[in-house]
């Protein structure tokens, strides 16, 4: 159905200008279970409010049949895919046996679920987004970045952002927003935002990468992606500017005015840390980044999906 279809019932949610984002060659994809349904709705509302990917095909992967029955999901998704059978078993097995913290197998199953997108698609390029994110600006530049790369992502923020421990946190985070990285940030993948180009959108690639992972152990799913794309010569990786996947917890390094300055340059804000806004109630001292999530959550609650 695509996000643009919300315009018919909810014109107040949409900006005056619609950005097409090469809708003919890109789809956007998500993977989640019923427990993250409200996060998905909030993410979609934020894309709608900022005119991002309104006309692109929407693909939803889930291992939870309850997601398939939700009216919001059915209204926005062009393709609803229940991951089951062999692929589900492969991903669940990796989540339990090929991570260093098997006690977190339930959480790992959710992160490996996104790998179901490694399959043939109706379009040449897929952009995957985690659902614990919100869009803060239009995204027209994303699809034009390094069109020769096969796998595009942003880095997993490390505890040490830059070599000088006493350096300016504001300056360093602004460098990362622009795509200037140091050390492990050049290779450690955060899989919350991924652009997958045609050579990765094959069932053969799914079986190749899962076989590779089955012979190794890493701390989590995106650790396997980091290692695979560092070792392979078959596919080209490119690190996107952190503006497209900024990990919210690092805003705590800044004061309120500095946070606002950095937020002004962020396109996608990722609540990747242990503190999630939906687990709190807003009050007078709620941090700015959480208030943004509550705003888009309220927009999601107001969406009418009845034609």
Image (tube, helix red, strand yellow):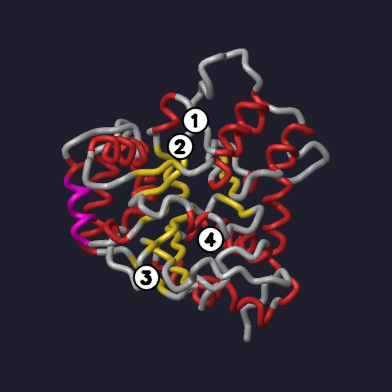
Task: Answer whether residue 206 is magenta in the image.
Answer: yes
On the rendered structure, is 177 left or right of 67? Answer: right
Q: Could you tell me residue 228's position as x and y percent?
A: 26, 40
State the mark number for residue 155.
2
Which of the two discs, 3 and 2, labels the residue nearer the N terminus?
A: 3
Residue hosting label 1: 181
Q: Could you tell me residue 116's position as x and y percent?
A: 31, 58
State the mark number for residue 7.
none
Disc 4 to disc 1: CB gap under 8 Å: no
Foreground mark, 2 or 4, reads 2
State the residue in front, 235 or 118: 235
Residue 201 falls in image quadrant: bottom left
Residue occupying the point 40% across, 61% down: 126
View extreme (bottom): residue: 307
State the mark number for residue 37.
4
Disc 1 to disc 2: CB gap under 8 Å: yes
State the mark number for residue 123.
3
Residue occupying the point 72% across, 35% down: 259
Which of the two discs, 1 and 2, labels the residue nearer the N terminus?
A: 2
Which of the two discs, 4 and 1, labels the residue nearer the N terminus?
A: 4
Residue occupying the point 67% across, 76% down: 304
Count of number-bearing discs:
4
For the residues labelled 3 and 2, the Cα–Cα distance comes to 26 Å
Disc 3 to disc 2: CB gap under 8 Å: no
For the residues labelled 1 and 2, the Cα–Cα distance comes to 9 Å
Above or below: residue 297 compared with residue 100:
below
Residue occupying the point 58% across, 57% down: 139
Mark 2: secondary structure: strand
What range is drawn magenta here?
203-211
């Amino acid at each position: 159905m695509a996000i643009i279809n919300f315009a018919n019932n909810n014109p107040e949610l949409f900006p005056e200008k619609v950005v097409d984002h090469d809708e003919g060659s890109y789809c956007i994809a998500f993977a989640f279970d019923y427990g993250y349904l409200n996060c998905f709705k909030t993410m979609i509302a934020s894309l709608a409010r900022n005119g991002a990917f309104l006309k692109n095909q929407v693909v939803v992967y889930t291992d939870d049949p309850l997601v398939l029955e939700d009216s919001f999901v059915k209204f926005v998704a062009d393709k609803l895919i229940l991951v089951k059978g062999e692929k589900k078993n492969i991903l669940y097995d990796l989540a339990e046996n090929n991570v260093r913290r098997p006690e977190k197998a339930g959480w790992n199953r959710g992160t490996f679920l996104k790998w179901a997108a490694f399959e043939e698609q109706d379009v040449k390029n897929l952009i995957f987004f985690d659902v614990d994110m919100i869009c803060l600006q239009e995204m027209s530049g994303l699809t034009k970045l390094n069109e020769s790369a096969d796998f595009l992502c942003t880095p997993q923020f490390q505890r040490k952002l830059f070599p000088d421990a006493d350096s300016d946190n504001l300056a360093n985070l602004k460098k990362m927003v622009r795509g200037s990285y140091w050390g492990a940030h050049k290779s450690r993948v955060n899989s919350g935002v991924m652009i997958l180009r045609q050579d990765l959108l094959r069932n053969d690639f799914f079986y190749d990468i899962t076989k590779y992972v089955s012979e190794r152990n890493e701390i989590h799913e995106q650790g396997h992606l980091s290692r695979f794309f560092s070792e392979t010569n078959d596919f080209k990786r490119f690190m996107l500017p952190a503006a497209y996947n900024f990990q919210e917890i690092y805003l705590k390094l800044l004061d309120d005015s500095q946070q606002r300055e950095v937020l002004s340059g962020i396109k996608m804000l990722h609540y990747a840390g242990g503190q999630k806004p939906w687990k709190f109630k807003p009050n007078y001292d709620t941090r700015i980044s959480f208030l943004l999530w509550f705003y888009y959550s309220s927009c999601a609650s107001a969406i009418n999906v009845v034609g």
